[in-house]
Image: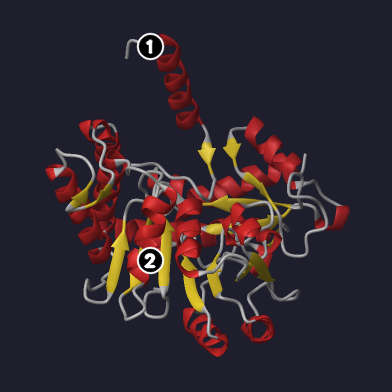
């Protein structure tokens, strides 16, 4: 690279990544093949529109690429093209969710999603997000004692509020999700069921988490978390007489985006193929077993693990303990000084602020990619304990 300042920044970031322990639950490390596709000549082509319906010439290879990526998005999750439509053009998760809402919910309608402080995402109707400005959020949370979803309570709220859509999706919920119950709740109030599986998509692909596809109307995932791909998103829509897929396509383009990033789509295709292999299934199993080992070791050190443990790659730790500990912000900063990267995070029943909350969020996907095992994560728990208790 001839641009020396940029080259130096990239080289410094490579060194930073090499020397830290990365416990960010929404990050991972891509393969060389994924990286090669992302930096390929596909970046040079503008491909506004969809395969066979582009607004520019010279898109023969782009059409072939996009159709292959759609095919892999179905195959990796064991889906039939007779039952599911797929859009691989969304640039990332929040605009992908926004596209689904634009396609299916009238302006001012209701989105029922988990509240931010209890494990939901900004794009599930939170007031600071565009999704909370164009639509009204009907929030639900977790049981105060178990810190798990109380489906009976969710059902009561849905019957009372009659949302247009229920979002079964989470950014800081560590337990398996009962998709069937969410389907029953959606049916009880006449709502669409949209699943945001951004965090667990790799686990779903590998059979380490129940699949939502049997129950959902639409499913969205980002690609860069447990699926171990580039920053991108995918939307699946069930095929029926409601023509949801066509509405979603129109919302993505021309509703929200212009031409797709074809280098990004090429990189997604590579990641999907990798996720459909035997090695990836072994990897996903290790991600979960490593998370359980980390959570168990921290519990043994007397840290309060939200919901008592984890079924996924994700762990929430209460560092505040009603004022007797340290804030999530302080905990994150202390750990980073010692080379352990986590993120501050709100916890159920949060009494502090989102910028200085009561907990931290940990994830095992990135360090599992680097080859760490359960013993390594027990050792990491020892390090976390020592750093935070000083």
Q: Quadrant of the N terminus?
A: top left
Q: Position of residue 169 (x, y in %)?
A: 53, 66
Residue 355 placement, left or right of 376: right
Residue 187 placement, left or right of 355: left
User: Toward the viewer: 178 or 368?
Assistant: 178
Q: Which mark is residue 247?
A: 2
Residue 222 placement, left or right of 239: right
- The mark lying in front, picked from 1 and 2, is 2
Residue 314 placement, left or right of 79: right
Q: Position of residue 86 (x, y in %)?
A: 30, 63
- Alpha carbon of mark 1 to alpha carbon of mark 2: how far? 43 Å
User: Toward the viewer: 5 or 310?
Assistant: 5
The residue at 16%/42% (across/down) is 59
Residue 47 lies in what quarter of the image?
top left
Mark 1 Cα within 10 Å, few/some/many (few <14, many 20+)? few
Q: Identify the residue position indicated by label 1 in the image.
A: 3
Confirm or deny contact between disc 1 and disc 2 (CB under 8 A).
Answer: no
User: Toward the viewer: 9 or 314?
Assistant: 9
Residue 293, above or below 3: below
Does residue 316 show up?
yes
Q: Secondary structure at mark 1?
A: loop
What is the residue that sits farthest to the right in this orientation?
323
Of the numbered discs 1 and 2, the one sitting upstream in the chain is 1
Q: Which mark is residue 316?
A: none
Residue 41 lies in what quarter of the image?
top left
Mark 2 Cα within 10 Å, few/some/many (few <14, many 20+)? some
Q: Position of residue 156 (x, y in %)?
A: 68, 86
The residue at 57%/57% (across/down) is 123
Q: Position of residue 115 (x, y in %)?
A: 67, 64
The residue at 73%/42% (across/down) is 329
């Amino acid at each position: 690279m001839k641009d020396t300042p940029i080259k130096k920044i990239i080289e410094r970031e490579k060194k930073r990544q090499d020397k830290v322990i990365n416990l960010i639950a929404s990050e991972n490390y891509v393969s060389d093949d994924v990286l090669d596709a992302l930096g390929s000549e596909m970046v040079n082509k503008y491909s506004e529109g969809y395969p066979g319906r582009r607004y520019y010439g010279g898109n023969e290879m782009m059409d072939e690429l996009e159709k292959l990526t759609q095919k892999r998005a179905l195959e990796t999750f064991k889906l039939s093209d007779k039952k599911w439509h797929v859009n691989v053009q969304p640039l990332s998760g929040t605009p992908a969710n926004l596209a689904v809402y634009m396609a299916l919910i009238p302006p001012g309608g209701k989105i029922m999603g988990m509240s931010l402080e209890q494990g939901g995402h900004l794009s599930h109707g939170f007031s600071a997000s565009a999704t909370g400005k164009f639509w009204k959020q009907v929030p639900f949370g977790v049981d105060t004692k178990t810190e798990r979803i109380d489906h009976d309570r969710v059902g009561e709220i849905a019957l009372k509020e009659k949302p247009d859509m229920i979002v079964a999706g989470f950014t800081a919920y560590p337990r398996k999700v009962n998709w069937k119950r969410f389907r029953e709740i959606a049916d009880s109030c006449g709502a669409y069921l949209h699943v945001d599986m951004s965090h667990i998509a790799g686990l779903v692909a590998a059979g380490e988490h129940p699949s939502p596809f049997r129950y959902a109307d639409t499913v969205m995932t980002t690609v860069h978390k447990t699926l171990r791909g580039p920053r991108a998103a995918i939307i699946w829509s069930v095929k029926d007489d409601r023509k949801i897929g066509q509405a979603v396509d129109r919302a993505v383009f021309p509703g929200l985006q212009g031409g797709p990033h074809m280098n990004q789509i090429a990189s997604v295709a590579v990641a999907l193929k990798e996720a459909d292999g035997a090695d990836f299934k072994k990897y996903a199993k290790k991600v979960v077993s490593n998370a359980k080992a980390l959570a168990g070791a921290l519990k043994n050190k007397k840290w309060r693990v939200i919901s008592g443990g984890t079924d996924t790659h994700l762990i929430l730790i209460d560092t505040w303990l009603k004022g007797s500990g340290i804030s999530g912000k302080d905990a994150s900063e202390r750990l980073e000084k010692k080379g352990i990267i986590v993120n501050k995070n709100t916890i159920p029943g949060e009494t502090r602020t989102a910028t200085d909350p009561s907990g931290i969020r940990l994830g095992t996907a990135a360090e599992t990619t680097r080859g760490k095992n359960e013993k390594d994560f027990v050792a990491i728990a020892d390090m976390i304990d020592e750093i935070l208790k000083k």
